[in-house]
Image: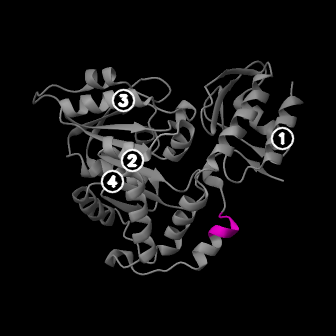
Amino acid sequence: MTIDYRSDTFTRPTPGMLEAMYNAETGDDVFGEDPSVNRLEAMMADFFGKAAALYCPSGTMSNQVGIKVQTLPGDEVICSQLAHVYIYEGGGIAFNAGAQVRPIIGERGMITAAEVAAAINPDDVHKARTSLVCLENTANRGGGCCYDWEEVLRIKAVCQEHNLKLHLDGARLFNALIATKQDPTAYGNVFDSISVCLNKGMGCPMGSVLMGSETFIREARRIRKKLGGGLRQAGYMAATGIYAMENHLQRLEEDHLHAKQIAHALLEKNFTGHMLPVETNILIFEVIGDWTPVSFAEYLMRDGIKVMPISTNQVRMVTHLDITPEMVARTCEVIAGMN
């Protein structure tokens, strides 16, 4: 038995999801004629209280399209130095939008309103024009941590004061919603654009949705086409998103519980150093003493348990749809036997 904690992108479609794919109504989405895509986009826009939505193949594409629409070449984008849009999207902000990044150190991948205000460039021809702020919730490299909502509102106020747009990389926003019991429409009211992934905790094989105003999505559709993201009979994939929204949202609580159970087992061991607070489905922790992240991963692999070294002293583990209570129990048992 293989137990894969490397990412929540390793999930496989459930039997119900496969059936939804098989029975999906499809058409040509470039012509706007795929009923399943249209239904998913309307469902997502309504869920978050936005006017319109656009189905994209990946979270990187939906982020990059959203950034491109809201910036001009030579502009500057503010985000955390640990933000996915900055370190894991292949330099896409520079390549696709022709903009540069002002990375903020922040804490656990999150930034504050005061830090955003201090990073905004003055109206000076020598400086890049600050035009966009990007937040990530949950913050991947912050151990799946969730933004404090009052801080988000303060950041929004700074953006409004300086005429900046606010984009949310909500790759794991569903995890944040379940953990904090927040109203998703609150996000729609605050953020100018929102990207959410269906291919992580929600368990879909692919797909991300970008949301915003009707004008924003009209331009986003044009940019998606330029990036090669024009979709044809995408309804087979969109059907998985519809199924996930109807069946997989509340079960994210189980992933969060599993992560906390594994965290408890790790914290019992003297080889576990600093662990970031476990708020959702991601564990990031140091290994110390005779262990390195690589040797730790190799040891667990002997029992078919896959984890991901992410630095010279840190390991990441992510719980997800395909991790069962029995797998968590077996993992904790193996950890308990380590010295």
Q: Nearer the viewer, residue 305 or 169?
A: 169
Can you tell which of label 2 and label 3 is closer to the viewer? 2
Compute the Cα span from label 2 to label 4. Answer: 8 Å
Residue with the mark numbered 3: 103
Q: Quadrant of residue 19?
A: bottom right
Can you tell which of label 1 and label 3 is closer to the viewer? 1
> SS class of the residue under badge 4?
loop
Residue with the mark numbered 2: 185
The kind of residue tagged 3 is Pro
Compute the Cα span from label 2 to label 1. Answer: 37 Å
User: Disc 1, disc 3: CB below 8 Å?
Assistant: no
View extreme (right): residue: 337
Decide whether residue 15 is among the magenta residues. yes
Decide whether residue 219 is among the magenta residues. no
Query: Going by the image, does 219 lie left or right of 31?
Result: left
Dot 2 surroundings within 10 Å: few (below 14), some, or many (20 or more)?
Answer: some
Query: Going by the image, does 263 lie left or right of 209?
Result: right
Dot 1 surroundings within 10 Å: few (below 14), some, or many (20 or more)?
Answer: some
Residue with the mark numbered 1: 329
Return the x and y of residue 213 as percentages of the image width and height: 26, 55
